[in-house]
Image (cartoon, rainbow, N blue to C red):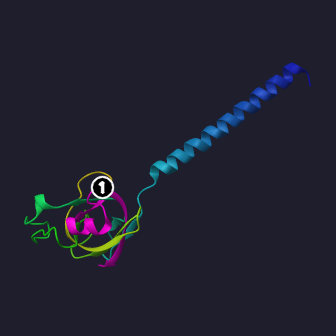
Amino acid sequence: MDPVTNRKANHLVGKGVCRSMFVVAFVAALLIGCASAPTTTSPDGQSHEVEGKASWYGEQFHGNQTASGETYNMHEHTAAHRTLPFGTRVRVTRADNGRSVVVRINDRGPFTDGRVIDLSYAAAAEVGMVNDGVAPVELDIVEW
């Protein structure tokens, strides 16, 4: 094969490899972009996020009425979740230290993107996140 033909062949092969790599990268980005947080399904068929970040709320809301109608007590092991039914008991495990606490859902929230649960002060203290404010957690339903 003469040098000119060889150069053309290498150029075409290079374009094919680049095109293939672009397609693979595009498909990977599309799949990653479509991924969502792990969920569980409640008896009523509704989907609920079970992994993400937790935050906590305390004294500022102590004594206020929750979305369930109860009075918020920062010293009880309770939590707010956007969709889990009131009364659901959830084991919240801090992903970076393994500490866990069981809470009862009695309020709605959190209303900040990226967060899946707001813990009471007492629950946050159990998992060691009072000083951190926000921590990665996993949720396991104990009782619906």
Name above or below for residue 118 compared with residue 144.
Answer: above
The quarter holding residue 122 reads bottom left
Residue toward you, 45 or 50? 50
Residue lying furthest top: 4
Looking at the image, residue 14 sits to the left or right of residue 60; the answer is: right
Name above or below for residue 13 compared with residue 84.
Answer: above
| Residue 13 coordinates in the image, percent (x, y) | 76, 33
| Residue 59 coordinates in the image, percent (x, y) | 12, 61
The quarter holding residue 11 reads top right
| Residue 56 coordinates in the image, percent (x, y) | 23, 60
Quadrant location of the N terminus in the rendered image: top right
Instruction: Report the magenta residues as a range.
Output: 116-144
Looking at the image, residue 83 sits to the left or right of residue 14; the answer is: left
Residue 11 is one of the magenta-drawn residues: no
Name above or below for residue 104 compared with residue 60.
Answer: below
Label 1 crowd bin: few (<14), some (14–19), many (20+), radius 10 Å: few
Residue 52 in view here: no
Residue 100 in view here: yes
Count of number-bearing discs? 1
Quadrant location of the C terminus in the rendered image: bottom left
Q: Residue at x 29, y 51 (%)?
A: 113
Q: Residue at x 41, y 59 (%)?
A: 37
Q: Label 1 sits on what residue type?
A: Asp
Which residue is labeled 1 in the image? 132
Give the structural element (helix, strand or loop) at label 1.
loop
Q: Residue at x 55, y 42 (%)?
A: 26
Residue toward you, 93 or 11? 93
Residue 143 is one of the magenta-drawn residues: yes
